[in-house]
Image (cartoon, rainbow, N blue to C red):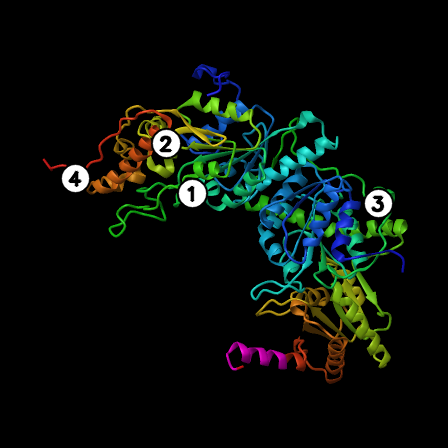
Amino acid sequence: MATTTRFRTLKDMPTVDYISPGNTLCAGCGGMLAVRIFHKVLGPNVVWVNAAGCMTVTMSYPLSPLKSNWLYTAFASAPAGAQGVRDALDVLIAKGKLPAAEDMKVVVVTGDGAAYDIGLQSTAGAIDRHLDFYYLCYDNEAYGNTGFQVSSSTPYGSATKTTPATATYPIGNIAKKKDLFEVWRSMKAPYVATLANSHGVDFLRKVEKGTGMRGPKLYLALAACPTGWGFDPRESMELEKLAVATGVWPLKESVDGVVKHTVVPRVLTPVSEYLKTQDRFSHLFEPEEKIEAIATIQESINGYWREAGAREGFQVKVPEPAKEKAPSS
Amino acid sequence: MKGKLLTGNVAAAAGAMLARVDYVPAYPITPQTEIIETIADWVREGKMDSKFVQVESEHSMLTAAGAASLTGARVFTATSSQGMLYTIEMLYNVSGWRAPMLLANVSRGVAAPIVLEPDHNDVLAARDSGFLQFHSETCQEVTDLVLLAYRVAEDRRVMLPAIVNLDGFYLSFTREPVILPEQKKVDRFLPPYEPVTPMRATKPVSRGSSVFEGFLYSYFRYNQHGAALKAKKVFQEAAGEFEGLFGRSYGPVEGYMLDDADYVIVISNSFTALGRQAVKRMRERGVKAGLLKLIMVRPFPAEEIAALLRGRKVAAVFDQNLAPGSGGILYPEIAGALYHVRGRPNAILPVVGALGGKQTTAKELEAVFEEMIAIDREGKTPAPMFLMRGDELNRVKKMVSVAEGKG
């Protein structure tokens, strides 16, 4: 973490808000909270460039909860929209057609469908061109706005509307979650970070750190999704905490390619504790427990943390994956 | 004729330079590449004060172009064929944003099968997108229409993006004398772009907001249509001023030997030159032939077309495009423009030709006039004509036989 930071404790969370209270998103939406916190750090001079998703529906004519600029582009090309805005600001300021005080931070905000799937080509282009912008992805691990269909961010074992758990397909989605953090890192993005709303100081510091860096910056924010994941909206924050505690959602950053975990859960909570809280995983427990599938998930988490620990020199105590069915009483 | 010998592509780039564009996002495709190479070169040599960026697709190119236009930059870009098809989603967005950027399209037939030479299925795929469309016959028109298009697009009564079309190969790679307008006069004709409600730190706005009620959506769409319709008058005004400054006159349509013509071919773009040749030959044969060239395709100049075609015996629409299962794309629009007109032609002959830039002879177009005469004489219903010569058909047969392994 940066040695100088405005953010030491949660009490340092700026009280200023650039999003009015009351908007059309679901109660307990982790995505909206991430956008709200992100904006607090960036300050008022922002252009949000959006691709189709849940945030799109909040900016519904003639209303907007935002006190900053907004541009909806298209599902596949929000980073290209950011390119146009950034370049236009640069050229107009350079030509003296626009005062430098009108300069703004350009932020792409999309869900995982755009960030992982349909928008990946334009994202790659913007990274190649070293475009100076922020990409905030609120990741709820499926196409949430259309009713929860599988995306390449959906984890193994999650049921979605297009990968439902059935007798023939008892696991739901069997593809592994795409590692977008590594995709960005491999393309030499100067800054890549993951965020969780439940870890506010870590969140604030990472955004702060990015404001001091030029070039493409990715923020992958875990976005607990009450309607898609199937849990009580009041549990959002607890659920994000649990995602971090179980090691499902590692909090980390990459600065010029060097990865560092910013929050290390020394003793991982068993992943089943997290899975049990959400309807999207309920088929892993009912009508009977899918021990092998849950063990697969646990082993994948354990492997991740063993490798990360070996690389960065920390140790994490991992839970033993269940081997066989518990004897019925 | 005075002027510098320029290809259509360089004429387009020169138009952009004279318009003092701020920003050029680009993506290469044959036969458009010379436009963006020329601009990249001029920018890097400091001859052109613009920002040039090559992006990773035409879809992104249009997104960046529209977004920059909304931020207050005058934007120019260019594409062709598949590239035009790849932009389509963004064309609708950019025109809905009311971002008055300019897109040069270098016409080329669309795949499959892949072809390099021109027809107009690419630019006409953008027909309903809300982009204004101006089509050029000569390299001079390319430069002039770029300047006129900016003037119309950025007019407060319009605020819509525009396409200037030039045919691949026939114009893009053909050198013709072009008189480049004097920069001082261009600056008078085309003042700096003044955006409406641009995104600003001091005055934030939401652009591209969603609209979930049909009545509100209808309102915005009707508004866009109204603005597009106004573009005709704005174009005519601008063309008047343009003529005063530069001495060249433009209208939404242009007539050739129309005064007493009984048989008129409606045509556009570079093949118009061939049409003129056919008209001359028919005149030499004593036939009262004439030609109507479309320059403005969007907004569609229905009144001008009707005014120039009324009182003719037969008209033919030469569509250098094909909508399989329907026919030529412009034919129904022209027929629609004439339906309620008293003294409309007795028949309108649909003609499809020069697909993929098929080399067409004046004789083929003379055959179109002969068919018009026959229709008039025999009072028959016009049957669509699909142009292909006997020698071409023989070559087709040979090639098919090779493809089938029959040698």
**Tag 3, which chain?**
B
- The residue located at (84%, 45%) in the rendering is B186
Q: CA distance from mark 3 to mark 2?
A: 59 Å
Circle 1: residue type: Tyr
Q: Is residue B401 left or right of residue B23?
A: left
Q: In the image, which disc is placed on residue A249?
A: 2
> Compared with residue A266, is residue B79 higher up or lower down, i.e. above or below?
below
- Give percent across and percent down for residue B348: 71, 73
Q: CA distance from mark 1 to mark 4?
A: 34 Å
- Residue A305 in view (yes/no): yes
Nearer to the camera, B218 or A207:
A207
Element at label 3: helix
**Tag 2, which chain?**
A
Q: Nearer the viewer, mark 1 or mark 4?
A: 4
- Start and end of the magenta stretch? B394-406
Element at label 1: loop
Q: Nearer the viewer, mark 3 or mark 4?
A: 4
Q: Is residue A120 magenta?
A: no
Q: Earlier in the sequence, mark 1 or mark 4?
A: 1
- The residue located at (23%, 39%) in the rendering is A285
Q: Is residue B391 left or right of residue B240?
A: left
Circle 4: residue type: Glu
Circle 2: residue type: Trp
Element at label 2: loop
* Chief secondary structure of the magenta portion: helix
Do dots 3 and 2 share one subunit? no
Q: CA distance from mark 3 to mark 4?
A: 81 Å
